[in-house]
Image (tube, rainbow, N blue to C red):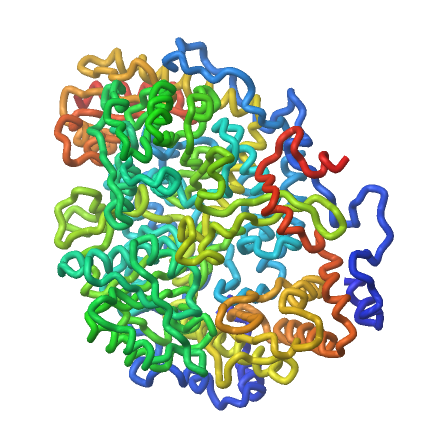
């Protein structure tokens, strides 16, 4: 077996040193009834690398790769170009095969990029501090609500109908089992939802998304004021982080906690994970934050260095009094994010955002000209919603049959609301081509 | 290495804390150790590491919310970016470089074929919400991994979506809460029992779900005190959270009695599967009476730790808990594979949703490649070699260090700091001295039940010659510590790492969590 270095003679020598006759003797504490004499039944034996690769190629051949079809799906995961440098860097063994940097003297590489990552997140969101990442945007959103509950000592979260439906479910699940109230508003299809009147003295936080799930770009500064007047916090979720290159950042409209899905920068679609949650807040709340934090310090020679810090918030020190049970986070995805953003820099990031917006505007104009298709958005970044004259799910299925991945029927994530059954969400990015857009328009005309 | 050889040639004890051994260089660099500024100190306006086309001119649809002013990101060219991260990478220790004996972390070889298959077009680039007709192979792949996990653990169901071990714990404990809810016992069963030696995530998870955590003591042999456990069980207990093999590296020999007692009291048995590597292919947790167990794919099944993630924490569930598994899951019907998502009509009472989309697919792919590479025969050998290697390390060090418990261990060897008594050298000092010898330290001061704990997990991935060199280094350090004259030398370690000991108190007292043009400690000092 190519991964196992011990030879039979090594094993004999090692057993002799231990003073055991057989390996089975080392398992003597396992109750006899549970000790398997032979290998686990019903499973195949080992394979060579070639056979393994072929097996995965066979899995891949049963899927339609987005690179092989005009592609317009977004809804919380976006198809962007990832520069070759990013994937090369994250596969360097010193990053890939290192553990959480508990020994800072020999993990300054990881710690320095986390410090740079935290700074980048703070800049993008216009917030004061950011942590070293969460699992993803959805779990980050639930952690943000828990954090708001701790800060306000209240237990009612208002959930906007513009929040991604699966994010809403994750918060509701957390609410159900961790014991607080999550009051969800109905899907905000037209982007005109009014939340201020729902805030009361029990409200710990309001959770909004910008751009919203249906694509609308909204000004939440009045909402932020209303939250603060009532002693509540405003949590702003961003599922398309590229939008922050063009849209006024949450920190400038008064957000208290910002959670982003960072997948768009540096991380491929990967069928939904692993992704990287970005989590930022104001300095005064830092000790209520979940997750790891990297901080600057000096070493015994007075040289600048970095360490994990404020760990008295965390489970390995604080145990049942920790701010969160999170341990492993999304280190390598954070590296992919920070390498890509460093390549982009100020000019590249701004241009990428402009490009996404322009592509989406082109797509929206083309679709709005298709008979029977109604564009719902006055505003959007790179994603918007159209109302079709018939159910959206079979239309998407029919287009998939023509090798066009057309978008997300809203009904897939909002199964319980028939009013969204004709709605289709579409995203365009720098990857979208004129040819692909024209193919979509032609396909739609055929199936509608 | 030349420097460390010098040290072993008789300079030990002669070095004063705070002093470096080599003269300073003009640049601050030391050959391959290059000092590296932050990206924010390197950027120049006008530089960029990507070439993007001019965007087409369109009417802005931003609702008047255009971002004004700079974000503040630095501009670097592509070669600068490559050099920056390459230099940073060289400041890290990694499995690819050698023995990484962090107990409870299972730092084993990370095969590169796993990386390759995870990136195949048609796998790595799929959108999670593509029509299911276009992702049949992806769903089949997830089901194939699920089948392996269920069969290897002897459990009937698995929830695939948790993102890491701690997230899996949350999933499992929510399932237990849901089962209690269904029986109308959730209000009454408020206590979760956990050994004092438990991972910090266990009490953190239980407390987050509103349970009161009650510690149960260990006996003199490092196992759960069965009598104390039985005394603690009652109609107010919801569950026990138990790691097995436990965090002392020992198999809970009375595990069958423990699970019987827990079930007789109407409670559930949550097994923390962090240490599954010791028993994979040799023992099925389902045969031990486990109700649920998370599996860290990034430990037992080699998906890379990546400097702290991403992980994946699928949870296997017993028949009693399977009805409460969270959305989503994979179903096969006459039309092929499909995904049961929120609101889908199903048997059972799903506890909800833990995460957007379908779980850590990139980790599933890597773990499945690892599992297929080993097969049932190879996985059994993994457990045997991991246990053999840990016992070998224990046997080879027991005369110079102090094993915490008698008898064979499982996949990790636990020592206390007894051998350092009166030497002036602490567990921390000993660990830092290992760094200068070219090794990542073992897990220190965990588990908490052992004084000055040192937990060594060599894994199955090291050749005997490499284990022998590692053992040799530890023996030399132990003997040097016990000479009684080297404490100052240990306290000054590490000397040869990219950084010497870092001031963690300063970092916590005056947190600097981001770069700012004016707040850098370095600049403040100037």
Q: Assign the C terminus of chain A to one quadrant of the image.
A: top left
Query: Is A178 placed above or below A76 here?
Result: below
Measured as percent of width and height from the top left, residue B31 is found at: 79, 49
Q: Could you tell me which residue is drawn at 16 percent across and 61 percent down? A: B185
Q: Could you tell me which residue is drawn at 19 percent across and 48 percent down? A: B336
Q: On the image, which quarter does residue A343 sit in?
A: top right
Q: On the image, which quarter does residue B278 sit in?
A: bottom left
Query: Is A265 placed above or below A429 here?
Result: below
Q: On the image, which quarter does residue A384 sit in?
A: top left
Q: Is residue A433 left or right of residue B269?
A: right
Judge by depth and name the residue closer to the eye, B13 or B407: B13
Q: Is residue B422 left or right of residue A372?
A: right
Judge by depth and name the residue closer to the eye, B355 or B340: B355
Measured as percent of width and height from the top left, residue A89 is found at: 58, 43
Query: Is B309 placed above or below A424 here?
Result: below
Query: Can I make out residue A406 in this image?
Result: no
Q: Is residue B174 left or right of residue B282?
A: left
Query: Is B470 placed above or below B133 here?
Result: below
Measured as percent of width and height from the top left, residue B469 is found at: 67, 73
Judge by depth and name the residue closer to the eye, B420 or A202: A202
Q: Could you tell me which residue is drawn at 31 percent across and 31 percent down? A: A206
Query: Can I make out residue A445 in this image?
Result: yes
Measured as percent of width and height from the top left, residue B71 is found at: 54, 23
Q: Could you tell me which residue is drawn at 40 percent across and 83 percent down? A: A29
Judge by depth and name the residue closer to the eye, A448 or B313: B313
Q: What is the tally of numbered marks visible in this picture?
A: 0
Q: Is residue B189 left or right of residue B521?
A: left
């Amino acid at each position: 077996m190519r991964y196992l270095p011990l030879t039979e003679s090594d094993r004999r020598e090692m057993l002799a040193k231990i003073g055991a006759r057989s390996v089975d003797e080392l398992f003597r504490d396992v109750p006899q009834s549970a000790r398997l004499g032979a290998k686990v039944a019903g499973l195949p034996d080992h394979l060579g690398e070639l056979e393994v690769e072929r097996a995965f190629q066979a899995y891949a051949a049963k899927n339609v790769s987005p690179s092989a079809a005009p592609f317009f799906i977004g809804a919380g995961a976006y198809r962007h170009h990832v520069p070759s440098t990013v994937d090369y860097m994250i596969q360097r063994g010193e990053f890939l095969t290192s553990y959480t940097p508990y020994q800072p003297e020999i993990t300054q590489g990881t710690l320095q990029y986390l410090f740079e990552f935290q700074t980048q997140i703070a800049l993008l969101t216009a917030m004061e501090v950011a942590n070293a990442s969460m699992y993803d945007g959805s779990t980050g959103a639930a952690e943000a609500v828990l954090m708001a509950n701790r800060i306000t000592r209240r237990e009612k979260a208002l959930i906007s109908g513009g929040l991604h439906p699966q994010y809403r479910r994750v918060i509701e699940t957390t609410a159900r089992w961790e014991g607080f109230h999550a009051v969800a508003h109905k899907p905000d299809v037209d982007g005109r939802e009014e939340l201020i009147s729902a805030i009361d003295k029990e409200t710990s936080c309001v959770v909004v998304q910008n751009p919203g799930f249906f694509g609308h770009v909204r000004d939440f500064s009045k909402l932020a004021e209303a939250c603060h007047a009532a002693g509540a916090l405003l949590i702003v979720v961003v599922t398309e982080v590229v939008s922050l290159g063009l849209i006024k950042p949450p920190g400038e409209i008064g957000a208290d906690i910002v959670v982003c899905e960072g997948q768009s920068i540096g991380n491929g679609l990967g069928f939904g994970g692993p992704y990287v949650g970005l989590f930022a807040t104001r300095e005064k709340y830092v000790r209520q934050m979940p997750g790891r934090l990297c901080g600057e310090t000096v070493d015994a020679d007075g040289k600048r260095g970095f360490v994990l810090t404020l760990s008295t918030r965390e489970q390995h020190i604080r145990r049942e009094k920790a701010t969160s049970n999170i341990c492993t986070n999304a280190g390598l995805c954070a590296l992919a994010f920070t390498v890509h953003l460093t390549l982009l820099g100020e000019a590249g990031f701004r241009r990428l955002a402009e490009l996404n917006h322009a592509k989406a505007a082109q797509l929206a104009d083309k679709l709005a000209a298709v008979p029977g298709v109604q564009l719902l958005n006055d505003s959007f970044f790179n994603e918007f919603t159209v109302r079709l004259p018939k159910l959206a799910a079979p239309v998407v299925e029919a287009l998939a049959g023509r090798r066009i991945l057309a978008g997300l029927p809203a009904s897939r994530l909002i199964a319980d609301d028939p009013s969204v059954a004709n709605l289709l969400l579409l995203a365009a990015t720098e990857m979208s081509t004129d040819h692909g857009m024209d193919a979509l328009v032609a396909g739609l005309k055929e199936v509608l | 290495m030349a420097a460390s050889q010098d040290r072993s040639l008789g300079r030990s004890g002669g070095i004063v804390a705070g002093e470096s051994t080599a003269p300073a260089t003009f640049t601050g660099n030391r050959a391959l150790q290059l000092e590296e500024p932050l990206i924010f100190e390197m950027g120049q306006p006008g530089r960029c590491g990507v070439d993007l086309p001019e965007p087409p001119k369109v009417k802005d649809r931003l609702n008047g919310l255009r971002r004004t002013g700079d974000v503040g990101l630095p501009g670097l060219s592509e070669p600068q970016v490559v050099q920056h991260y390459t230099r940073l990478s060289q400041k890290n220790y990694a499995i690819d470089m050698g023995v990484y004996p962090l107990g409870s972390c299972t730092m084993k070889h990370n095969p590169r074929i796993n990386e390759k298959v995870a990136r195949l077009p048609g796998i790595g680039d799929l959108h999670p919400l593509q029509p299911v007709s276009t992702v049949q192979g992806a769903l089949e792949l997830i089901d194939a991994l699920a089948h392996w996990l269920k069969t290897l653990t002897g459990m009937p169901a698995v929830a695939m979506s948790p993102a890491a071990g701690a997230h899996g714990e949350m999933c499992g404990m929510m399932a237990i809460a849901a089962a209690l809810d269904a029986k109308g016992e959730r209000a009454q069963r408020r206590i979760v029992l956990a050994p004092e030696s438990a991972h910090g995530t266990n009490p953190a998870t239980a407390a987050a779900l509103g349970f009161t955590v009650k510690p149960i003591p260990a006996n003199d042999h490092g196992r759960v005190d069965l009598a104390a456990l039985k005394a603690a069980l009652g109609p107010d207990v919801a569950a026990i959270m138990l790691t097995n093999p436990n965090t002392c590296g020992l198999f809970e020999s009375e595990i069958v009695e423990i699970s019987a007692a827990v079930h007789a009291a109407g409670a559930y048995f949550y097994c923390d599967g962090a240490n599954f590597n010791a028993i994979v292919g040799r023992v099925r947790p389902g045969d031990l009476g486990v109700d649920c167990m998370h599996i860290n794919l990034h430990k037992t099944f080699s998906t890379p730790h990546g400097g702290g993630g991403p992980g994946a924490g699928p949870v296997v569930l017993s028949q009693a808990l399977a009805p409460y598994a969270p959305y989503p899951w994979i179903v096969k019907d006459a039309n092929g594979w499909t995904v049961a998502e929120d609101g889908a009509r199903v048997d059972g009472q799903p506890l909800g949703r833990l995460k957007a989309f379908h779980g850590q697919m990139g980790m599933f792919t890597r773990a499945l490649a690892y599992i297929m590479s080993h097969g049932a025969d190879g996985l059994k050998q993994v457990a045997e070699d991991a246990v053999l290697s840990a016992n070998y390390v224990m046997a080879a060090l027991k005369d110079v260090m102090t094993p915490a418990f008698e008898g064979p261990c499982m996949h990790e060897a636990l020592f206390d700091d007894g051998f350092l008594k009166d030497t002036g050298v602490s567990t921390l000092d000993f660990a830092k001295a290992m760094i200068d010898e070219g090794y990542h330290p073992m897990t220190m001061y965990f588990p908490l039940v052992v004084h000055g704990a040192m937990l060594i997990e060599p894994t199955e991935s090291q050749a005997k010659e490499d284990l022998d060199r590692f053992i040799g280094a530890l023996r030399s350090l132990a003997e040097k510590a016990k000479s009684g004259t080297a404490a100052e030398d240990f306290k000054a370690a590490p000397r040869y790492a990219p950084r010497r000991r870092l001031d963690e108190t300063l970092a916590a007292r005056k947190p600097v969590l981001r770069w700012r043009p004016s707040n850098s400690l370095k600049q403040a000092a100037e």
